[in-house]
Image (spheres, helix red, strand yellow):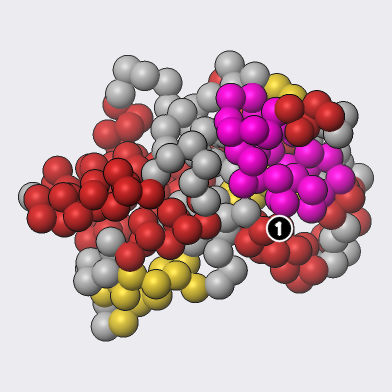
Amino acid sequence: MECEQKMMADGAYAFFDVDDTLISVKSMFSFQAFWYDQTGDELGRARYEQDLRRHLHPGASWEFLNRLYYRHFAGRDAKRVEALGQAWFEQQRKSESPFYHARPLAELEMHQRQGCEVVFVSGSFPALLEPIARELGVAHILATRLAVEQGRYTGEILPPQTIGAGKAEAIGEFLALRQCSPESCFAYGDDISDLPMLQAVGRPTVVSGGRELEARARAMGWRVIAPV
């Protein structure tokens, strides 16, 4: 079986959160600013920023913020979002600031060399994640799927919501289809919302710098690495 072949290498799959774990920007927030710059939708920008001021705070629920974020996609043409997602990525890669965190990127490449397939698990969406995956040779993405009607986003997302417990649910479904044990798998995350994902595998690693997670990881004896 596929899983048995992979376990001869160093584990079956390596699941990576993306924003602040693998890359140095919050892709969703960064893209939203890019979208408004490119489209000139200043009324939409004002509504979005008003929502952020009202709901974004240190103890905010990422699950709630994730749904709130995608409500601002209602009515957007899906193909235009995909095109601007690629343009956003190209702009990021031209920036002088490092786009990837050096240590997590090195770990990802190590897993690939050892024959362990990498899977992105993110609350972000495919239009932003696919260019990153292509550049890094990542074949699998578990991410937010947006409901579409007549080529336009409705503002709603499809289950599972790949934030918090939804990340563990998505991983469970992914591994069940491949008849793989989670105990042989790796996962990397930086934020307390990644805790369910990390608990869902046998070999969790925490990237330091996120909300609340590092202390929990050390208390449980998990591996902790710096982003650089």
Residue position for label 1? 168
SS of the residue under disc 1: helix
* Residue located 70% across and 64% down the image: 169
Q: Is residue 161 or residue 13 the one in the foreground? A: 161
In the rendered view, tell whether residue 161 sits above or below residue 210: below
* Residue located 76% across and 33% down the image: 216
In the rendered view, tell whether residue 19 sits above or below residue 172: above
On whether residue 173 falls in the magenta region, the answer is: no
Image quarter hosting the C terminus: top right
Q: Is residue 1 or residue 202 the one in the foreground? A: 202
Where residue 227 appears, as percent x and y from the top left, is: 59, 22
Amino acid type shown at disc 1: Ala
Where residue 167 appears, as percent x and y from the top left, is: 64, 57
Q: Is residue 4 or residue 88 the one in the foreground? A: 88
- In the picture, measured across the screen, residue 30 lies left or right of residue 215, that is left
On whether residue 193 falls in the magenta region, the answer is: yes
**Total marks drawn?**
1
Where residue 13 appears, as percent x and y from the top left, is: 76, 49
- Magenta segment: 186-214
- In the picture, measured across the screen, residue 98 lies left or right of residue 184, that is left
Where residue 95 appears, as percent x and y from the top left, is: 30, 23
Q: Is residue 91 or residue 147 the one in the foreground? A: 147
* Residue located 49% across and 37% down the image: 58
Residue 127 visible (yes or no) = yes
